[in-house]
């Protein structure tokens, strides 16, 4: 779901790294159109392509993996999509 930055900061049962991750994710996918389920694997890959360095700098790799795992649990992405996204993340963040 899309939650405003102000509303996100009001959640007391969500840790700060999760808030930061979801604010970045929500901003990335925010639009006035509905996102088809079949588009989510590509959107996740594009998100990592665009924001890997920010995620790395904010130490949000765990939140990315948790988000991808939740999407896998819901049948929205495959294990291959997760591996592809995490491989891209690792490549972009290699120092």
Image (cartoon, grey):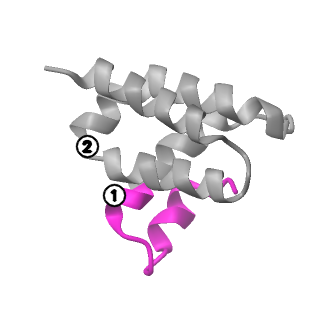
- Where does the image place residue 51, in percent across and percent down from the top left? 42, 28
Corner quadrant of residue 9? bottom left
Judging by the rendered image, the residue that carries numbered circle 2 is 58
Q: Which residue is mark 1?
A: 17
Question: Was residue 16 drawn as part of the magenta stretch in this picture?
Answer: yes
| Residue 79 seen | yes
Q: Residue at x 53, y 29 (%)?
A: 47
Where on the picture, by quarter, is residue 12?
A: bottom left
Q: Which segment is the magenta one?
A: 1-19
Count of marks, rendered view: 2
| Residue 71 image point, x, y percent | 64, 51
Please state the horizontal and vertical placement of residue 31, each as a whole percent of the image.
Answer: 75, 34
Visible in this render: residue 35?
no
Residue drawn 43% across and 72% down?
A: 14
Q: Is 70 left or right of 39, judged from the image as shown?
A: left
Residue under the image location 56 percent in, 26 percent down: 45
Assess whether mark 2 and mark 1 are in contact (beta carbons under 8 angstroms).
Answer: yes
């Amino acid at each position: 779901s899309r939650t405003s930055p102000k509303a996100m900061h009001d959640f007391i049962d969500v840790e700060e790294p999760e808030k930061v991750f979801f604010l970045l994710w929500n901003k990335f996918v925010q639009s006035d159109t509905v996102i088809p389920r079949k588009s989510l694997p590509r959107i996740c890959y594009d998100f990592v392509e665009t924001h890997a360095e920010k995620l790395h700098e904010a130490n949000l790799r765990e939140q990315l993996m948790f988000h991808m795992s939740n999407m896998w649990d819901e049948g929205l992405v495959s294990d291959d999509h997760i591996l592809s996204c995490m491989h891209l993340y690792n490549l972009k963040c290699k120092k």
